[in-house]
Image: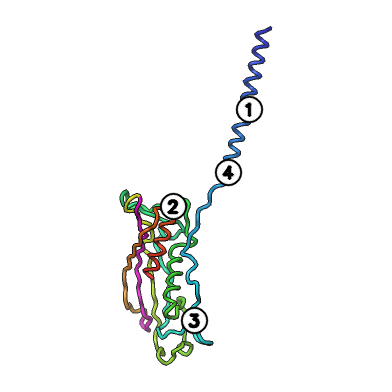
Amino acid sequence: MKNATHLIATHAYSTGARALFLVFFLALSGCALTRPTARPAVYDFGPGRLSSAPAPQAGQVAASALAPLVLDEVQASSALDGSAVLYRLAYTNAQQLRPYAQARWSMPPAQLVRQRLREQLGQDRALLEPGAVVSAARLSTPGALAGVTSITLRVELEEFSQLFEAPGSSVGLLRLRATLTRASPSGAGLLAQRIIVVQRPAPSADAVGGVQALRLATDAAA
């Protein structure tokens, strides 16, 4: 009888212990499931110009004597289509692009670069969207620019990454191909083409440093 009682007590204790362990395990699992995940930091090139340019007179498009420029959409390789902030480890495998897990651009790099180009180039001349037409009568210097055909700037973004030359040393690397063409009755004529490569040192060996370096490189290229 004593053995039976001891057996029942032992079974009840082990059953209770298992139940308590199960409750504890489920509580831990619930904490893990409800723990908020960290959101990636989102970056852009900053607010841009903080003062407005002189306003043109009523009915005028530009206050500059330079011919208007058509700024085409910036093209980029498929690797740069997304919003990931990318880096390379030149000392390990420079051919591999790696994304930062907790850093994102606010828009694809090609759009950020075009935005900066518009800001910089628009200080000296009128910038037009692809397909836009402006008559000489609407320009601030209609006589001087009459008969001028439109010039188009096409940009291809080939590289836009943080390049680590050593674990603690990196640069923001930008490489783009800029092509100028002039419209004519027979088609677009090539005026010039240039490969532009700009590097700027990153102030820190992380995504924040890479973003700052790429912004400075873009400003220099523009």
**Which residue lies under the disc numbered 3?**
54
Q: Is residue 65 left or right of residue 39?
A: left
Instruction: Say if mark 4 contacts mark 3, CB within 8 Å.
Output: no
What span is colored magenta in the figure?
A: 168-186
Give the residue type at disc 4.
Answer: Arg
Q: Position of residue 90 (x, y in %)?
A: 32, 52
Which label sits on residue 100?
A: 2
> Given the current orientation, which residue lies at the most extreme top position?
1
Q: How many marks?
A: 4
> What whole-number distance in Å separates the C-alpha atoms at marks 3 and 2?
41 Å
> What residue is rendered at 39% in x and 86% in y?
148
Of the numbered discs 3 and 2, the one sitting upstream in the chain is 3
**Dot 1 and dot 4 residues touching (CB under 8 Å):** no
> Which residue position holds label 1?
20
- Residue 172 image offset from top left, x and y in percent: 37, 60
Instruction: Identify the element where label 2 is drawn.
Output: strand
